[in-house]
Amino acid sequence: MLQQYGIVAVFLAGGAATAIAALATNWLLRPRGNAVGDKVATYECGLDTRGPTWVQFKVSYFLYALVFLLFDVETVFLYPWAVRFQVLGLFAFIEMIIFIAILVIGLWYAWKEGALKWL
C-alpha cells in the first residue's frame, strides 16, 4: 500500500521539479536591460491608444461568464446519469433531485444578486 503512495510522491516531485526547472530557465535566459521606447508602449491591434490605457471592465461580464461555466460543467454530470437512469434505481434518482435542487438554488441566488443582468 505504501508503494502506491510512493509512486504518487515520485510524480508530484517530478512535476514540481519540472515547474521549478522551467521557471529557473526562464529567469536565466531573460533579457537583463531596462526596456525603453516602444518596448514599454501599450499595444492594441496596431493602433496607438488614446486616453487611459487601464480601463476597468464591469465585473458583471465576468460573473456572467463564471455562472455560465458553472452550469455548463454541471450539465456534464447530468449526462451519464441520464444514460444509466434505468439501472441506477431510486437512490440515484433522489441524489440527482438533490443535485438539481442545489443547482436551482445557485441559479436563484445568482439571479437575485444580479449576476445574470447583462447591462
Image (cartoon, grey):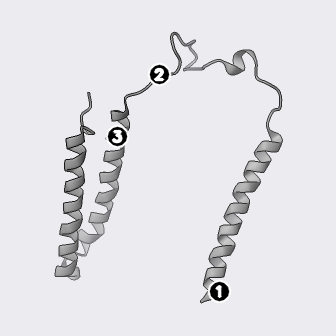
Q: Is residue 72 above or below residue 115?
A: below
Q: Position of residue 103 (x, y in %)?
A: 24, 57
Tag count: 3
- List the residue tagged with mark 1: 3
SS assignment at label 2:
loop
Circle 1 crowding by C-alpha within 10 Å: few under 14, some 14–19, many from 20? few
Q: Secondary structure at mark 3?
A: helix
Q: Is residue 117 above or below residue 12?
A: above
**Which residue bears the numbered disc 2?**
55
Please report the residue visible at 71 percent of the width from the left and 21 percent of the height from the top: 39
Checking the image for residue 63, the label placed there is 3
Q: Residue at x 34, y 56 (%)?
A: 73
Q: Where residue 3 sits: x, y (%)?
A: 65, 86
Asked where in the image residue 8 lies, by quadrant, the reply is bottom right
Q: How far, Cα to Cα, is label 3 from label 1? A: 44 Å
Residue at 22%, 69% in the rendered image: 96
Quadrant position of residue 49: top right
* Percent coordinates x, y for residue 19 in the rendering: 69, 56
